[in-house]
Amino acid sequence: MQLSGIRARLAALGALPLHQERVLRDWVQGAAHERGRRPASDFLPKPVREALPLLDAELAGMTRLVSAHPAEDGSERLLVALNDGQMVESVLLPRDGVCVSSQVGCAVGCRFCMTGREGLLRQVTSGEIVAQVVLARSRRSVKKVVFMGMGEPAHNLDNVLEAIELLGIEANIAHKNLVFSTVGDLRAFERLGQGRVKPALALSLHTTRLELRSELLPRAPRLTPEELVDHGERYARLCGYPIQYQWTLLEGVNDTPEELDGIVALLRGKYAILNMIPYNSVPDLPYRRPSWERARAIAAGLHAHGILTKLRDSAGQDVDGGCGQLRARAGRTIALRRA
């Protein structure tokens, strides 16, 4: 279900834009928003009021919680079924955040990612993206939405931007707390600055060497790291908050002294934050997570050279939380049951 389709449906019932906004606002903000407010029935057109029970049921049915996996770090990984039976993953993050999926599968094929191993199965609609946030809000407070789950948001750009606009206007979420993550698609750079809501931007960097980036992200746009940072810097100046450069730390691959020198040369003086995330190990893949002591020493060294570096632990280490693992395990279970 698309958000534009919901609006068109309401408009056909006589709902003016302000009525449509009220219905969508009540959905994305949830029951806590309703307390102390006049009921929608006080001012919505009668045909809209009569249609609301069915619409509410359809909105609630867009996602279904299959399983929840709480971790010791305060995160909780959710396996979420969509209306057609496909499944995606969402992650409730510490400090009131949620990471949502924008695709079922992914076409980029990052070598260290479970999601990319199965390719792209289908796009997640704008309604399904927002429904993941609504589901998260039914479990805890959500003040930040990160588009870093399954999928490449730039490959589902219309749906993701439609969801971002609704969340930034009606969901009471600060625009800088809507984080659009991409491997660096030129279409995203062109369109992110054109909307009413300008999200924060996270760019998957992972290495300063073009040949290694081509190996790790085989179907990412062929931008050099320098070109990627140039595009990021322009957007940072436009939106007014720093670019978050993502660096999945792989032992023996991108944690070398040469790479660290490359980071300093590439990012010093830029309006940027480097999010360094030790790898969340995936079975059957050759990459390994460096020790926390090694990761901490790398972050400290970058700080000493003027690079604002945040060392982040990948959420859900104790529940095999690498993105795509829950879905993969569920798929194997279903296949075994059918066999």
Image: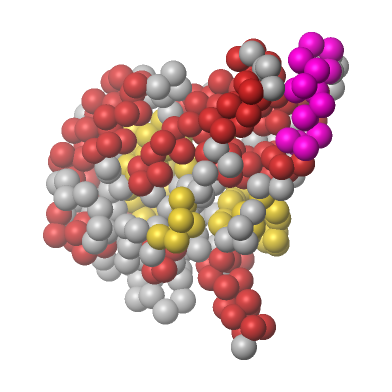
Q: How many marks?
A: 0
Front position in the image: 185 or 269: 185
Q: Position of residue 45 (x, y in %)?
A: 76, 15
Q: Is residue 218 above or below residue 48?
A: below
Residue 231 x, y percent position in the rendering: 22, 33
Q: Residue at x 33, y 62 (%)?
A: 109
Residue 313 is one of the magenta-drawn residues? no
Q: Main secondary structure of the magenta part?
A: helix
Q: Position of residue 50 (x, y in %)?
A: 82, 26
Can the viewer see residue 315? yes
**Residue drawn where x is 45% and y is 71% of the image:** 282
- In the image, 185: left or right of 132? left
Q: Nearer the viewer, residue 140 or 65?
A: 65
Image: 335 above or below 177 = below
Q: How is the image coloured?
A: secondary structure
Which contiguous range is marked in magenta? Answer: 41-56
> Among all residues in the image, which is located at the extreme bottom?
339
Q: Quadrant of the C terminus?
A: bottom right
At x 41%, y 36%, the residue is 158
Q: Is residue 148 above or below residue 110?
A: above
> In terms of image quadrants, where is residue 28?
top right
Q: Give the side of residue 49 with respect to residue 202, left or right.
A: right
| Front residue of this view, candidates 252 and 328 | 328
Q: Report which quarter residue 55 is drawn in.
A: top right
Classify residue 34 by image quadrant: top right
Q: Quadrant of the N terminus?
A: top right
Q: Percent from the top left, x then y, of residue 221?
A: 21, 49
| Residue 262 showing in the rendered view | no
- Relative placement, left or right, of 219 versus 78 is left
